[in-house]
Amino acid sequence: MRKNDKLWMIILFCLFSLMLLASPAFADASAVAASDGHAWWFWPLVLLIVTFIMGVVAVLAGVGGGVLFVPIISGFFPFHLDFVRGTGLLVALSGALAAGPGLLKLNLASLRLAIPVALIASTCAIIGAMIGLALPTNIVQICLGATILGICALMLTAKKSEVPDVPKADKLSSMLHIYGVYQEASTGEIVDWKVHRTPMGLALFVLIGVMAGMFGLGAGWANVPVLNLLMGAPLKISVATSKFLLSITDTSAAWIYMNKGCVIPMMVVPSLVGIMLGSFVGVRLLKIAKPGFIRWMVIGILAFAGIKALSKGLGF
Amino acid sequence: MPLKKKIRDLMIPIDKYASVFPDATLKEAAMTLRASHCELETGMCTEAGPRTVLVADENCKLLGILDFKCFLETLIPEIAGGLSAKLSALGVSIAFAQADAEALDESRLGFQARVIKNAETKVRDIMLKVRGTIDADASVMDGLKKMFRNKIVVLPVYEGDKLVGVLRDTDLFLAVTDVFEG
């Protein structure tokens, strides 16, 4: 990137930050933060530290940042669920946007697979976001709790298949030209892949899209099993396409939250910085060791957060 | 007088210069550059061989240029790449780690495997734009001005619409320093 491009990016970032800081949502958040007896910087600092740790843990445990962010911040912090979901979407989005170009360049994220799925998932994410913001908070809280417990069950039970056996591509996937080739870098082997059960997969993306928009969880936890286990895309392609898919799905839903004033810079900026820095550190740590207990610990925390969300929603 | 020479007297004729098609892989381009660079190095040891490869289509229309930096930035982006390449590589690693599939992350492969994989990149995706050309009958001073104003190290040389050679900063250096030899 040339120096001028970098300079323009910094200027645009500063202008965007100024616009957000000048928004009424920012003023509201400052007022709320100041009124709870803490200095204005208290909660952003706490968020920065917590999300940094979350970023490290997410990478070590093999879960997405958004999946950890929404349950934990909504369960244990005094922020309204709408703001947490809006921020959660942007947290998930930041990881997807950081990875997207690289995954496309490596020819791992498949546009042929991503585009039809993204069309459905992003449309449903918009609907999900609208439903999520229209429903009473306690109902959303109950649904969120149930979803988090479902994610825990999925994390405990879901298996992965590196190159699933797809005997024959179905008609819809052939019509949409959903197939591809990639080279396995470790062996040099050329892997031809195709998918099956496309109608069922696309139908599930309706649900995934609605849930992604409604809860701001990101959706990698659901995308990968559907693409890999149900539709039969190789794991590498599924992971990469899922991440790329998030950048489209979450952007669609994020607009709704932004439009409703649920994206507060006081929450978003420290959370994004924290989670990204944490993820960078996590990746470095991962090259040295991967402590197995962290995944179990995360499942435990998520289960606790899910139960807490349920009890909050049910008013216990 | 050395500075009265024309560009055509200094340039490397196009048939002696390395060139590849835009759909060639980086590996093919690298092998072409290695061959021409080393060939000229051996033959004309005081004048360095080409440090760039031209990218041209079937009609000999020049589309771009590849230099050593392009090669290294693509082959080892985690070291030679810019900030965005490094962040992009980190983003990919995070994506695989968060999906509990870090073993599939190609950045964990050995150096050789990564270089071989990255060498499959198509030339058209990384080639540099041609920033300026020069006429074969132009003077050395014109060549110097164009090269320094455009901050480049090679200038494609044209005769009318036909690409006839390449002028390098090495050639201009030799032309200018010829004044010391009287």
Image: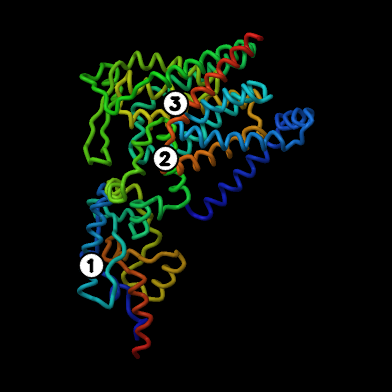
Spatial CA distance of label 2 from label 1 is 44 Å
- Give the amino acid at mark 3: Gly
Residue placed at 57% from the left, 14% from the top? A131
Chain of residue at mark 2 = A
Up-down relation of residue A33 to residue B10 (above or below)? above
Q: Which mark is residue A289?
A: 2
The verdict on a common chain for dots 2 and 3 is yes
Kind of residue indicated by mark 2:
Ala
Q: Amino acid at mark 1?
A: Cys
- Secondary element type, mark 1: helix
Q: Residue at x 38, y 20 (%)?
A: A158
Q: Which circle, 2 or 1, is nearer the viewer?
A: 2
Location of mark 3 (residue): A220
Query: Local crowd at mark 3 within 10 Å, few (<14), some, or many (≥20)?
Result: many
Q: Same subunit under labels 1 and 3?
A: no
Label 2 and label 3: CA atoms lie apart by: 23 Å
Q: Residue furthest bottom?
A: B182
Residue A41 left/right relative to B161: right
Image quadrant in which you'd find residue B117: top left
Chain containing the residue with disc 3: A
- Are dots 2 and 1 on a single chain? no
Residue marked by disc 1: B38
Q: Within the image, what quadrant is residue B160 found in?
A: bottom left
Residue A107 shows in the view: yes
Locate the C terminus of chain A and report the quarter of the image it occupies: top right
| Residue A66: % across, % down | 52, 28
